[in-house]
Image (tube, rainbow, N blue to C red):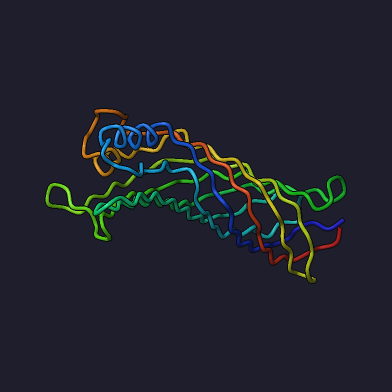
Amino acid sequence: INASAQELKVDLSYNYSYSNQLDKIIQTYNFSRPFLSEKQPLFMNGLNSSVSYVFKNERHLNSGINVAYSYFRSVAENENFNTTLQLNFLKLGYFLHYENPAKWKGLYTDIILSATSSGLFRNVNGEAFVYDEATSKAFGIGGEINLKLGYYLQLKNRTYVSPFISFAYTPYLYSPNSEVVINQTKGLCAKNWTSILGAQIGLAVHLRQQKND
């Protein structure tokens, strides 16, 4: 039976996201501007990348640290009015990593608890949007729980790849100026916080040390 003793992992994935409050803000923006031929898309499709380190441990249940970055972009091109919204997330997490090759060879599970920060920015016609004589931006902070399921495929002695899926939930992200950045209003159509549901599918590369039990 091979038990993971130490591991470094890098992954890249497609990231689907749903935020009720951000959707309301963008939908209000579109409704209040009927002259726009191309509506502003919702923040649904993005990319996620992360780096994880599993601490040295000879048991099936290990722990580690994780740093992740997610990026979402919403672009609407209209005549003399091109608007780009950029939503960024930076996450620092602690996770539990479980695998049991004797029962489920190749399968592993990560449960990740992360502190999350966000940054929302708006560009109009290629320039940073200025509102009230300042660059329009909104920062947020919250927390996320993520469940990841993957399957190891060995390439070389220490090198593995694994396709994976994951499901994430942010119960509370405090970002009071998101509505200001997108719609130039505050408290009109949304709260100063939001919850977020997410799903990912991607590929990870692992460098592992093995110990035979």
Relative side of 42 to 3, left or right: left
Q: Position of residue 8 (x, y in %)?
A: 64, 63
Relative side of 77 to 203, left or right: left
- In the current view of this chain or complex, which residue is farthest to the bottom? 156
Q: Position of residue 93 (x, y in %)?
A: 52, 50
| Residue sitting at x 25%, y 52% | 81
Relative side of 83 to 10, left or right: left
Q: Position of residue 55 (x, y in %)?
A: 64, 58
Q: Against 62, is 24 above or below?
A: above
Quadrant position of the C terminus in the picture: bottom right
Count of numbered tags: 0
Quadrant position of the N terminus in the picture: bottom right
Q: Against 79, is 173 above or below?
A: above
| Residue sitting at x 87%, y 49% | 102
The residue nearer to you, when weighing 158 against 4, is: 158
| Residue sitting at x 60%, y 40% | 167
Q: Against 149, is 31 above or below?
A: above
